[in-house]
Image (cartoon, grey):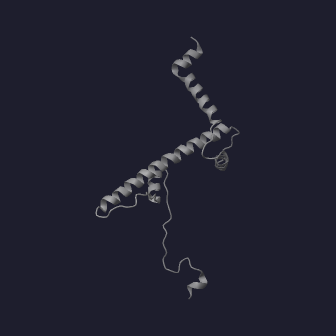
Amino acid sequence: MNHNKQQSSDGGHDDDAALSDFLASLMDYTPTIPDELVEHFLAKTGFQSPDLRLTRLVAVATQKFIAEVASDALQQCKARQATVVRDKRDKQQKDKRLVLTMEDLSRALHEHGVNVKHQEYFADSPSIGMDPASRDE
């Protein structure tokens, strides 16, 4: 039995060829996220590779992740604003713009396994955050 025919019947040879073609196509593709930025963050994690294809592969995966999160956040925003419109039926909605909130983004990220804890902004007294010299006045 020919070794190449056995790989081809299992699909292994075809998968290898498709992977090789895909990796080769990354050399001609310019991702949205610059190579230098990807290399910087990969280096911060301790990963370094001279192969530009790996850097571009990470860039493409990151771009896909960001697009999915943005799409999910948009759906969260639309659902939230549709609820607000239903609750205020008597008020005519003139402004059709969507306003993305941190809550929309947090929910979308949570669906992808990323938990975001954002700081609660409040002041205990009106003088918090003021210059110490002006507090006494």
- As drawn, 8 above or below 85: above
- As drawn, 87 above or below 74: below
Q: How far across and how far down the image is residue 87, in percent?
A: 30, 61
As drawn, is 88 to the left or to the right of 114? left
For residue 50, which quarter of the picture?
A: top right
The residue positioned 52% from the left and 18% from the top of the image is 9
The quadrant of the picture occupied by the C terminus is bottom right
> As drawn, which residue projects farthest toward the right?
50
- As drawn, 5 above or below 25: above
For residue 104, which quarter of the picture?
A: bottom left
- Give whichever of 76, 91 is nearer the camera: 91
Q: How far across and how far down the image is residue 57, in percent?
A: 60, 39
As drawn, is 119 to the left or to the right of 38? left
As drawn, is 55 to the left or to the right of 87? right
> As drawn, which residue projects farthest toward the front?
94
The residue positioned 60% from the left and 82% from the top of the image is 132
